[in-house]
Image (tube, rainbow, N blue to C red):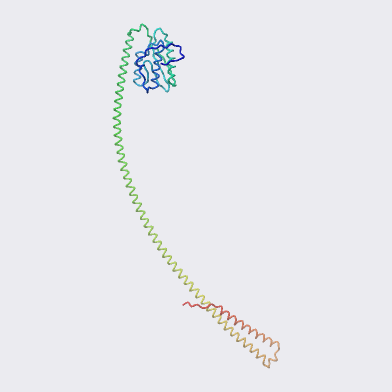
Amino acid sequence: MQHDPNAHTQVTEVPLPAELTEPLSEDASTVAVVARTAAETALGVPGVHHLGGIAARAADQLRQQLGRSAGTAGVQVDDEDGALGVRVSVVVSYPHPVIAVADEVRKQVTAATRQLSDVPTSVDVRVLDVHGPFDDEPSPLGRAAEATGDAVKQAATATVDATKRAGDATGEALKEAATVTADATKRAASATADVTKRTADATADVARQAADATRDAAEATADATRRAADATADATRRAADATADATKRAVDSAAETTGNVRDAAAETLVRSSELAADAADSAKDAAAGARDAVVDAAAAPTAAESTAPADRAAAEDAAAAAAASADAAAQAADTDAQAAPPRQDRS
């Protein structure tokens, strides 16, 4: 039992109720440990006859069985919003002052609970009754209170049983509902699976048909492309052949035309050379005749002797010029005949 070491109150060892002597379980909650400590501490304060009254004990037992809080006889601990609320109900022994006993109980319980937890804790002490020599025999009020406590206990037991039965019935109902839900879920899953399978099959069929149509279109496109390529190749080949033929004919025609022109020019040049040669021969003959005439005239002692020397000199110069001209014409004719290209045979 723990209590405030600074308190100047004498602590008296008192026999504990059976419920306070039973050891707590290893997994006991903080609330249960605080309730046990508060009860032991309050019972150790001088002037405390016992904890709780008959009705208070019955009400505490009812709240504990309903799971609303934890506690022991005359002590109730509530956990609300992270804070502990401890309520201690005591019966004071006569003739101890009631207020002093209540203050001491509050002080001791507060000090003891603070050593157990850092959670904020408030302690409320209620004095239910004063026990004296006249209370050794139960009074009619005590008997009525005890009867009330028994009735409350019975009501609490009945409530717990009813709650348990309701819980069992609820569990069965929940189990049945879970089974029905599982069956419905299984049926829905099966139906969904069937619909999904049918949808997948239909999608696969549509995809297969689309693939076939795409393959047919690709083959048709390939055939058309191949035919177009063949036609283009044929047309290109025919155009190339026609272009080659036309080019060959043009080349042959140009060559023939060039040959004709060259032959004509050669014939003309030869003809001109022949004419020039003839003219040169004629000029030579004329020059020779003129020279001879001049010589003859110079040699005859006839009237030419009476001719003036100036006229004779002029005649000689003219004859020499004519001879020079005839020689130049003959040389030009020879040069043209040598420069003329030979005539090609186009046969």
Q: Quadrant of the N terminus?
A: top left
How many numbered marks, from 0 up?
0
Closer to us: 116 or 180: 116
Image location (x, y in percent) of residue 275: 56, 82
Q: Nearer the viewer, residue 39 or 273?
A: 39
Check the image and name the residue furthest to the top: 134
| Quarter of the figure with residue 38 | top left
For residue 313, side relative to residue 143 (left or right): right
Q: What is the quadrant of residue 150 in the picture?
A: top left
Residue 84: give x, y in percent of width and height. 42, 20
- Which one is nearer the viewer's eye here, 164 or 198? 164
When the figure is inspected, residue 323 is found, relative to residue 48, above or below; the finding is below
Residue located farthest toward the bottom when viewing the structure as drawn:
302
Above/below status of 222 relative to 57: below
Residue 126 in percent (x, y) is at: 40, 13
Q: Is residue 230 left or right of residue 258?
A: left
Place residue 340 in its image quadrant.
Answer: bottom right
**Residue 248 at x, y = what percent?**
45, 70
* Above/below status of 86 relative to 341: above
